[in-house]
Amino acid sequence: MSEYAAPVRDMQFVLRELAALDEIAALPGFGDATPDVVEQILDESARFCAEVLAPLNRPGDVEGSTWRDGEVTTPKGFKDAYRQFTEGGWNALQFPAEHGGQGLPKLVAAPVMEMWKAANLSFSLCPLLTGGAIEALLLRGSDAQKRAYLPKMIAGVWTGTMNLTEPQAGSDLAQVKTRAVPAGDHYRIFGQKIFITYGEHDLAENIVHLVLARTPGAPAGVKGISLFVVPKFLPRADGTPGERNDLRCVSIEHKLGIHASPTAVMAYGDKDGAIGHLVGEENRGLEYMFIMMNAARFAVGMEGVALCERAYQKALAYAKERLQSREIGASGSQPAPIIRHPDVRRMLMSMKAQAEATRALAYVAAAHHDRAHHHPDEAARARSQALLDLLIPVVKGWSTETAIEVTSTGIQVHGGMGFIEETGAAQYLRDARITTIYEGTTGIQANDLIGRKVAREGGATAKAVLAEVERTAGALRDAGAANLGVIGARLAAGRKAAAECVDWIVANAGADPKAVHAGAVPFLKLCGIVLGGWQMGRAALAAQARLARGEGDAAFLQAKIATARFFADHPLAHATALRDVVVEGAPGVLALSDEQF
Amino acid sequence: MKVLVPIKRVIDYNVKVRVKADGTGVETANVKMSMNPFDEIAVEEAVRLKEAGVATEVVVVSCGVAACQETLRTALAIGADRALLVETDAELQPLAVAKLLKAIVAKEGPQIALLGKQAIDDDANQTGQMLAALLGWPQATFASKVKIADGKAEVTREVDGGLETVATKLPVVITVDLRLNEPRYVTLPNIMKAKKKPLETLKPDALGVDVAPRLATLKVAEPPKRKGGVKVPDAAALVDKLRNEAKVI
């Protein structure tokens, strides 16, 4: 059996029962996403991930990418796997057909990308960054830029990067210093960028860097930053990579996790300046970045889902085979598999339930992305866009914070063996640790959630969502089944807690912004467990309905209801306490002077 | 030259098969199904023959329930050109399938019928041989290497003693073994293209074939559970048990 088997059955359940795949497939342009085709895509992707990507995960972690004289070598096997990945057409999954993509819905891309990430997070970062660069060029690239870059990048023959960060400009991009000097029809780029994922590597024949820089005389701050496309090799007229541009990888970082993914320090313009072309208009670079940010943040949220799943699978396999201590209440002295011990079961259930809840919420968000872009009705598009905007920081922040907890629990299930690197459980925690940091830390997500997504519109979208949560809670209570009634009661309590926080945030965001921000991350977590609990409640209702109709695999559906019950009684039970932390916790956060720390 | 590849939809090889409580068969409800792995190798070989310019068209055929269409789509995604489904809910035994395939051969006129050597569900290992007999064609079974040239097939067979190479005239029935090739990963564009390739559905009646079972299944049972071992005090006790209990010496 492979180290990782994609949870295709749960993915299919979420796609059909919670994210309304049939509705998405009926949107204009998505006619190809019929259930049979989606099933085949998931099956083939699962096979590729299990047989090609997953076996390289641990060796890639051990070997890591290496730097020598400006060249980066990826771990053994990555080059061949990347070739198979692009030849399989997987890189083109979700991009428009007019540039060589397959044009599939985000909702279908979501499970496929979850598989890449779960199988091999370091590997998956290369197509992730290429995807970000593709989105930027699709949005604001000139026709010539689209022609020169998109077909190659969508095929994956060329990869892409996003160059935002500089040593003094991390979360605060207002401090970007890289310069872009006009030179005829192009610009010369000078400066240093850090934390550039796959900034240099040996997987593809060219690397297309998208670089944030300032033109001479640009306004200070974020309103003076422009976006440039700066390829490693300048494309010739026939589209092949030509002259080497004046940019190089100075070094790569030594990191806690994602060792196989090269994180480059890039130097632009050591000689005459790297040749770059402006994307869109001058001084609007950050705005373009923010349009894409939703996609990138969603993708990192999916990394959280993927790591929860991978850690769960490994811990489960170990718990079934490791024999230690007699089962409570059993006769004789035979040691039992540790899965029989209640605390180990509790840990496994918390891993399983959170993997399923984060997955469900993320796929539902992906379906809103498809509606927001493809629904024929403008009001429906706007509604889904507002929902998506609200969900993105939650999917990003909550799924990744949850992944740190779940991967840590995975180590705990392994006991002492979990602390030993050869076991492989530790890698998932080390890899997960970056996911709450890059593409905006959890704090940044939470500030976005309370500021732009809740307070700015008086909590309108949040309240609309919570009204739907209440309807689900009512349906659960009325279902007449014991488990469902308990889930409904917990969900109603969670909704009330979240609604009180929304009211408090709206009321205090203007008068006492520091107090509101002090509770931002606990509020994000509360939103995650209430909205995740909502999806698990919907899952329980759907499972109950299928059981009543005598459809589907009864064991799976009963387990789904039991898992939803666990989610309600464990993570969701924390909702009321989190409400107190959000509403009443600020004084303790803000009391000390800097000197008193 | 046309190649016909019959394929069978079976319980996925990763599934732990369970016998139905009433002992009439195995549980197939809500069980993951996929293409018989030997047949996948046959499809791969046929597509390679086409890619090498030896074959001009690869036609896949399956006999069974409507859901076999999914299995045929997989074969189309690997690279087959078109598909035929002989649709029936009836139980199909190897002889019935061989008769249906004979009728399909008459309709399609292939030079090669390329089959998996057996299906992993019933392990009958009969259909290819029966088809060859019904058609009066030569057969080359358990192929681990296939070479088609000059109107002849040169097939290396995996036999008990090692490898045996036979040459036959075309048309021929070839059944394939595991080591013939390693099926490719299906690409995303080919999955999408497969949806648009032709898939024709026929009924056994239209082919004039009576598919009624000739064999009756009396009972299906799980293999007996292995009993735990025992410690014997000495060699004499072991010999005694081997002789009188196990009756092996």
Image: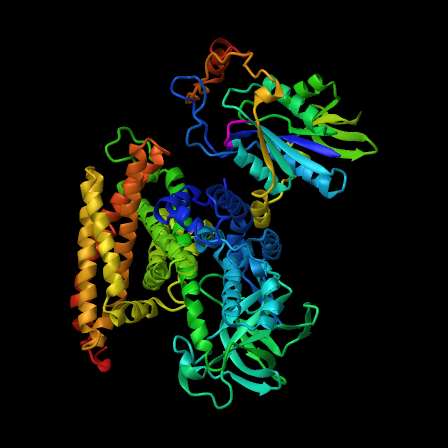
Q: Which image quarter: residue A64?
A: bottom right
A226 shown above or below A420: below
* Residue A106 visible from this viewpoint: yes
Task: Look at the image and give the residue range highlighted in magenta.
Answer: B63-67
Measured as percent of width and height from the top left, residue A488 is found at 20, 46
Q: Which image quarter: residue A524?
A: bottom left
Q: Nearer the viewer, residue B162 or A305?
A: A305
For the view shown, which residue lies furthest in the bottom direction? A217
B238 shown above or below A233: above
Q: How did the renderer colour the structure?
A: rainbow
* Residue A304 visible from this viewpoint: no
Please count the marks in the image: 0
For the view shown, which residue lies furthest in the right direction? B150
Measured as percent of width and height from the top left, residue B173 is found at 71, 25
Task: Identify which residue is drawn at 21% across, 48% down.
Answer: A473
Measured as percent of width and height from the top left, residue A592 is found at 19, 77
Q: Nearer the viewer, residue B226 or A583?
A: A583
Q: Nearer the viewer, residue A222 or A37?
A: A37
B19 shown above or below A481: above
